Each structure stands twice: as C-alpha cells, then as structure tokens.
C-alpha cells in the first residue's frame, strides 16, 4: 500500500514552491480547461503536442523527481498499452473488403471514342506509395484507422488524468476554492449558491488524503494478520473484504462527523453568515505572461490543430 503514497494523485505539494505554484489559480484553471477543451475536434498532431507540453511543464517547473516520476511513469505505461491494443484492434467487422483508395484518387471517366486513358505519373506514384495497412505480420495487423483511434485514445487518457493531477499538485485547495468562486460570481444573479458549492469543493479536496490514509491503514491491518486466503475460499474471502469495506465506511463517516463538529464549534453556521476570505487574488506579471501565451496557444490550435474531415 506504499503505492498510495508514491502516487499522490490529487494531493497538494507544499514544498518546494515552483513557478507553477505562484501563478494565479484562475489562470491555472483556465489553462486546465484549455487543455481539456482544445482536445476536442483536434488532429492527432495536436493531441501528441498536448502530451509533450504537459511533460515539458513538469520538467521546467522543477517539481521534484520523486513526486512525478512514478505518476508519469505509470500513466505513460497505461497510455502505451492503450496505444498498442488500439492499434492492433480491427477497425470494423471481420469481413473481406476491397482495399481503401487514397483521398487524392481521381475518378477517371471512360472516353467516348474508346481511347485508353493515361494516368499521370505523379498520381500513379502516389497510388503505389499509399497503403491502408501499415503493418501486417502474423496475427498483428495495424491499419490507418486503428492507429488514428489508438493515438486519440492514448493521448486523451494521459492528458485528462495528468493535466488535472498537475493542477491539483501545484494549487492548494483554498486557492482552487477562491479561484472558482471568483470566476463563478456572475452566477449569483441566477440565485445559484456559489459559496456553498465552493465550500463543498474545498471540503472534498481536504477529504481525499483522509480517504487514502484510511484505505492504506485497513489494507495493512489485513496484511499483517497473515490470513490464509486459500483456506477461506471465495465465499470466506468475500466476507472478509465486505467487513473491511464496512469498517472503511464507518471510519470515513466518523471523520466527516468530526469535521462537521469542528466547524460548528468554531461558529460556522452557514457560508453566507460566516464568510471566509480564502485568498487575496491579484494578477501579477507572470499571470499576464501566462495569459498571453494562452492566446498564442489557442491561435495555434485554431490555425494548425483543427481536424480536417
């Protein structure tokens, strides 16, 4: 269960304070949404570029190697597995069909006088070079469509998980709360409880380490008892794990009750009556530079990253 500590997904890195930590949480949130939304209707070159950008940000932010090495390593292994499985998967039904023609194929109409048509040398060379099946060796067969789908799936797995984790790693829960509350201020006109929503989010983020700690303690308690799982059988093993899950829920509910009592003792009755100043938000020079780079980012996305159907 040391894997839970070596892969601290969703946890905040307090030290050292990198340049990513010092950016305004609103700017980082907009960057995160840009990574997640620019993936839609994008070509595979842009999707691979997003993965490279995330790796570059991690390296140049000088985040300790011990923090992101195993996180990124396991995610890269998972992405490569998705890429390999997707590339070797068939792109349709297992039926025999004629080979696909290249997109630049010209439809030649037969001449009226019965004369033979001559194909241009450039078009003939291009047709000879085109191949729908990229690799075929034994049972392994990779074609263009399966490879495109594999790249799309593998990159979205890495981008979705690691971009969110990098944001949580470099942004404190209070900063996330204050940033979201600032961006959601226009929703107050529609009588949406913005403060309650952001407070719930803060408590949820604070609760994640408690959940990981309880899971780790319970699994270690089962391992130290040296249970003979072969003698218990399937039914006995399932009964033991049901008891562990029940104990986990009891511990988590107890932690939640303790947290609620601590807030009530401190006079916290409702978010509107007990206002909490989470963070003093102010855009600095680095934030304006990040916004300018974001504009260039979207310009490149619109100019070169849009998928052409």
Image (cartoon, helix red, strand yellow):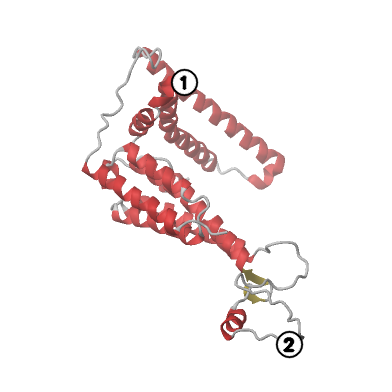
State the residue in front, 5 or 65.
65
Residue 7 in percent (x, y) is at: 43, 47
Q: Secondary structure at mark 1?
A: helix
Task: From the image, state whether disc 1 or disc 2 is nearer to you.
Answer: 2
Q: Secondary structure at mark 2?
A: loop
Q: Residue under circle 2?
A: 115
Residue at the spot 73% in from the left edge and 81% down from the top edge:
111
Query: Which residue of the protein is positioned furthest toward the left in this rendering?
Result: 285
Q: Does residue 61 appear in this view?
A: yes
- Asked if the residues shown at circle 1 and circle 2 are in contact, with their CB atoms under 8 angstroms apart, the answer is no
State the residue in front, 81 or 211.
81
Residue 51 in percent (x, y) is at: 43, 56
Q: Residue under circle 1?
A: 190
Quarter of the image for residue 241 reads top right
Residue 283 in percent (x, y) is at: 25, 37
State the residue in front, 205 or 21.
21
Relative side of 119 to 296, left or right: right
Relative side of 22 to 223, left or right: left
Dot 1, crowdedness within 10 Å: few (<14), some or many (≥20)?
few
State the residue in front, 298 or 226.
298
Relative side of 91 to 190, left or right: right
Q: Does residue 5 appear in this view?
A: no
Residue 174 in percent (x, y) is at: 34, 30
Residue at the spot 70% in from the left edge and 73% down from the top edge:
99
CA distance separating discs 1 and 2: 74 Å
Relative side of 304 to 285, left or right: right
Residue at the spot 45% in from the left edge and 30% down from the top edge:
204
Dot 2, crowdedness within 10 Å: few (<14), some or many (≥20)?
few
- The correct choice, above or below, for 217 with respect to 268 in the image is below
Q: Earlier in the sequence, mark 1 or mark 2?
A: 2
Residue at the spot 27% in from the left edge and 31% down from the top edge:
281
- The correct choice, above or below, for 273 with respect to 205 in the image is above
């Amino acid at each position: 269960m040391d894997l839970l500590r070596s892969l601290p997904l969703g946890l905040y890195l307090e030290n050292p304070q990198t340049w990513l930590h010092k950016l305004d949480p609103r700017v980082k949130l907009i960057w995160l949404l840009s990574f997640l939304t620019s993936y839609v209707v994008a070509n595979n070159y842009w999707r691979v570029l997003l993965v490279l950008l995330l790796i570059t940000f991690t390296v140049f932010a000088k985040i300790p190697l011990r923090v992101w090495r195993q996180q990124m390593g396991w995610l890269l292994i998972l992405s490569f597995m998705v890429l390999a499985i997707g590339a070797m998967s068939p792109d349709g039904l297992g039926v025999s069909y004629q080979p696909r023609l290249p997109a630049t194929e010209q439809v030649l109409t037969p001449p009226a006088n019965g004369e033979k048509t001559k194909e241009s040398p450039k078009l003939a060379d291009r047709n000879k070079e085109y191949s729908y099946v990229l690799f075929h060796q034994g049972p392994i067969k990779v074609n263009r469509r399966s490879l495109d789908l594999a790249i799309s799936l593998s990159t979205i797995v890495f981008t979705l998980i690691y971009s969110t984790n990098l944001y949580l790693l470099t942004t404190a829960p209070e900063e996330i709360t204050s940033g979201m509350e600032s961006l959601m201020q226009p929703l107050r006109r529609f009588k949406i409880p913005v403060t309650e929503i952001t407070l719930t989010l803060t408590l949820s983020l604070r609760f994640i380490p408690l959940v990981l700690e309880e899971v780790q303690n319970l699994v270690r308690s089962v391992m130290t008892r040296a249970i003979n799982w072969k003698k218990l059988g399937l039914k006995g093993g399932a009964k033991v794990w049901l008891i562990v899950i029940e104990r986990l829920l009891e511990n988590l509910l107890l932690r939640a009750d303790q947290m609620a009592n601590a807030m009530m003792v401190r006079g916290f009755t409702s978010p509107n009556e007990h206002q909490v100043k989470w963070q003093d938000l102010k855009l600095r020079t680095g934030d304006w530079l990040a916004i300018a780079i974001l504009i260039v980012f979207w310009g490149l996305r619109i100019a070169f990253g849009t998928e052409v159907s």
